[in-house]
Image: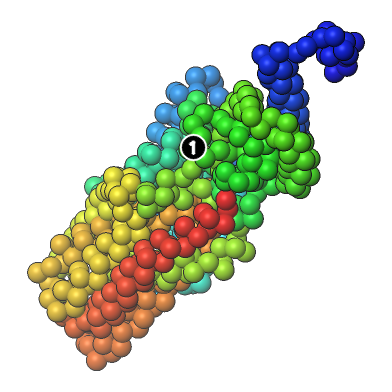
């Protein structure tokens, strides 16, 4: 500002001119407003340049980053263009595909017939069934395949495995190939792998077609169909194939292959408006695109260093937010501070006008920067869906290993029970039809447990930790098997139903926890590691139970054991180990409550 441009200052050069007090105050006010305008414009440009550089760096990073969402997978053309109809068809066929894929659960319905036809011992048939269970729960192979290629190719792989495995079992029973225990175990293992592939593809694709508030219910229904499978096809066998074991196996080979093939086209991830994934939090202070998060200053003193004295936004008693990005924050703050100090000395009598650009900048940043929107930590499950855990990190987590141990005991011992229901009925001298009835009862309990736990976990998730569902499942199994150890015969049907409930509940909640706690992007591999526990537990405990049974049968005339004592040790073992699972579950509740808040604080 020069004297030539300001006529009022030119008057001061005239020695005959007398300035009044009012004119002096007016000139000082004008000078203060000029400094204010200069300071605000400088600060606005500084913040705008920071904001623009942030957006530019984010855009550049997103361009170079690969798409990591579940929608990156190949989807075949669909003859229906309406995405909501596609979602309904995907869920409907997913339910049917999982209903068919769980038939290996019902193999114990025909286990005695297969044993007698092939001349196996109880240990031999128990080993073969356990290898099928291992295949159904070793998800590292097909789980990793799903993480790489998605639902279409995973269902295609399942189709191939179904053809090989089911035709192989049929050929052994038909007498077309060797009836060795090892070969039967291999084919049942392939059927188990195909079942896991179908299950993973259908569950993950469909639950992520809905919002997080309904995923427990969708998961429960889908998992429930897997449980119901044994009951449905056990009934089919009793009604249509009672005296035709080979015909039943051929029928299942054709059905499973065709259903899985059709699933490759119908089961898919669908982009629906309003269905979004929660923002991933990162302990390394980076967002999901790998960009360094911006620093938030919420201090009156630090704000004054940036914006000058007496500058305010709204109420003076309210704290202010300023957003700085990375290393540029220090240089920006220092330059702003130096300019502010000069303006402060010139305008101490006149408050600077509030900046109009700052509130808008803050509101914009709250929308675009995830961590400016606070997470409600009063919800005990506030980290649901907000993690993306790699396999290496997973194997270092206390939480994962606690869940692994619980699933090892609860899942393994439940499958041990299921694999032995036919032998239990025989040991208690029940009629031949009872063992197939028990498989159906177990399946109904399994269905109730899976669907019920899905709905229950959604219902209580806003008030209590989902880990209480784990505790409840293990407690049901523990108490049920304690009663069975002392009095099995009158409790055979109720105990079978309750074991089905406990097992269904633990499977349902483990699927949910693997997705919610460890993230959906690596679900196939992460849940594969978790499911290893159930598979190994099934193999170990079924073998132990069979060995105990065979040992007690040695002195019998017909080589079989009769009475409640045949499974007394097995049930006592199950009671003790499931009770230990309850204790671990309670520990997890308190451990994760403290650990989750620490993890959230690190990410801020």
Q: Residue furthest left?
A: 490
Q: Is residue 325 above or below residue 407?
A: above
Residue found at x 43% / y 54%: 513
Residue 233 horizontal/vertical position (percent): 31, 49
Q: Identify which residue, 400 or 451, lies in the foreground.
A: 400
Q: Is residue 557 above or below residue 575?
A: below
In the image, is 72 to the left or to the right of 115?
A: right
Task: Residue under label 1, please give it.
Answer: 318
In the image, is 419 to the left or to the right of 269?
A: left
Circle 1 SS class: loop
Q: Quadrant of residue 501?
A: bottom left
Residue found at x 72% / y 17%: 24
Q: Identify which residue, 352 or 415, lies in the foreground.
A: 352
Q: Identify which residue, 530 or 323, lies in the foreground.
A: 323
Few, some or many C-alpha atoms within 10 Å of disc 1 (few <14, some 14-19, many ≥20)? few
Residue found at x 33% / y 48%: 461
In the image, is 392 to the left or to the right of 400?
A: right
In this figure, which colouring scheme has been used for the structure?
rainbow
Residue 553 horizontal/vertical position (percent): 26, 86
Q: Residue furthest front?
A: 16
Say if residue 250 shows up in the picture.
Answer: no
Q: Is residue 25 above or below residue 453?
A: above
Residue found at x 64% / y 37%: 309
């Amino acid at each position: 500002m020069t004297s030539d441009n300001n006529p009022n200052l030119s008057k001061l050069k005239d020695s005959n001119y007398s300035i009044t007090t009012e004119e002096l105050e007016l000139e000082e006010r004008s000078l203060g407003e000029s400094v204010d305008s200069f300071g605000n414009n400088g600060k606005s440009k500084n913040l705008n340049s920071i904001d623009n550089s942030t957006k530019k760096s984010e855009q550049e990073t997103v361009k170079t980053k690969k798409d990591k969402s579940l929608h990156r997978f190949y989807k075949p053309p669909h003859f229906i263009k309406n995405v909501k109809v596609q979602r309904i068809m995907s869920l409907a066929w997913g339910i049917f595909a999982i209903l068919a894929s769980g038939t290996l659960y019902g193999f114990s319905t025909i286990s005695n017939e297969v044993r007698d036809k092939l001349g196996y011992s109880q240990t031999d048939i128990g080993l073969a069934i356990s290898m099928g269970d291992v295949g159904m729960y070793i998800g590292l192979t097909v789980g990793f395949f799903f993480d790489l290629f998605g639902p279409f190719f995973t269902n295609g792989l399942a189709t191939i495995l179904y053809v090989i495995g089911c035709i192989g079992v049929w050929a052994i029973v038909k007498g077309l190939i060797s009836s060795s225990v090892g070969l039967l175990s291999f084919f049942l293992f392939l059927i188990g792998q195909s079942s896991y592939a179908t299950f993973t593809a259908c569950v993950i694709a469909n639950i992520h077609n809905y919002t997080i508030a309904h995923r427990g219910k969708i998961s429960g229904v889908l998992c429930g169909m897997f449980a119901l499978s044994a009951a449905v096809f056990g009934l089919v066998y009793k009604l249509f194939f009672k005296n035709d074991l080979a015909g039943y196996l051929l029928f299942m080979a054709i059905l499973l292959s065709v259903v899985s093939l059709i699933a490759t086209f119908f089961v898919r991830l669908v982009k629906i408006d309003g269905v979004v994934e929660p923002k991933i939090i990162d302990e390394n202070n980076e967002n999901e695109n790998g960009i360094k998060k911006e620093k938030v200053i919420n201090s009156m003193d630090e704000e004054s260093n940036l914006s000058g004295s007496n500058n305010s936004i709204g109420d003076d008693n309210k704290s202010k937010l300023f957003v700085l990005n990375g290393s540029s924050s220090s240089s920006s703050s220092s330059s702003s501070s130096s300019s502010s100090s000069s303006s402060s000395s010139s305008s101490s009598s006149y408050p600077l006008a509030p900046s109009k650009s700052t509130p808008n900048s803050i509101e914009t940043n709250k929308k675009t920067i995830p961590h400016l929107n606070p997470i409600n930590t009063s919800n005990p499950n506030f980290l649901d869906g907000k993690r993306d855990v790699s396999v290496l990190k997973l194997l270092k987590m206390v939480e994962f290993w606690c869940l692994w141990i619980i699933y090892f005991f609860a899942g393994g011992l439940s499958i041990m029970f299921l694999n032995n229901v036919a032998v239990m009925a025989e040991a208690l001298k029940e009629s031949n039809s009872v063992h197939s009835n028990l498989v159906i009862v177990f399946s109904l309990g399994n269905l109730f447990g899976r669907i019920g736990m899905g709905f229950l976990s959604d219902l209580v998730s806003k008030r209590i930790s989902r880990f209480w569902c784990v505790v409840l499942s293990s407690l049901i199994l523990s108490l049920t098997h304690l009663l069975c150890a002392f009095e099995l015969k009158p409790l055979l049907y109720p105990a079978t139903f309750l074991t089905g409930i406990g097992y269904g509940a633990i499977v349902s909640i483990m699927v949910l926890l693997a997705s919610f706690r460890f993230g959906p992007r690596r679900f196939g591999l992460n849940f594969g590691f978790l499911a290893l526990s159930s598979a190994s537990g099934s193999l170990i405990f079924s073998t132990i139970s069979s060995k105990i049974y065979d040992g007690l049968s040695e002195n019998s005339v017909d080589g079989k054991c009769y009475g409640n004592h045949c499974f007394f040790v097995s049930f006592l073992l199950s009671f003790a180990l499931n009770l230990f699972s309850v204790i671990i579950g309670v520990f997890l509740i308190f451990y994760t409550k403290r650990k989750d808040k620490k993890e959230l604080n690190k990410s801020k």
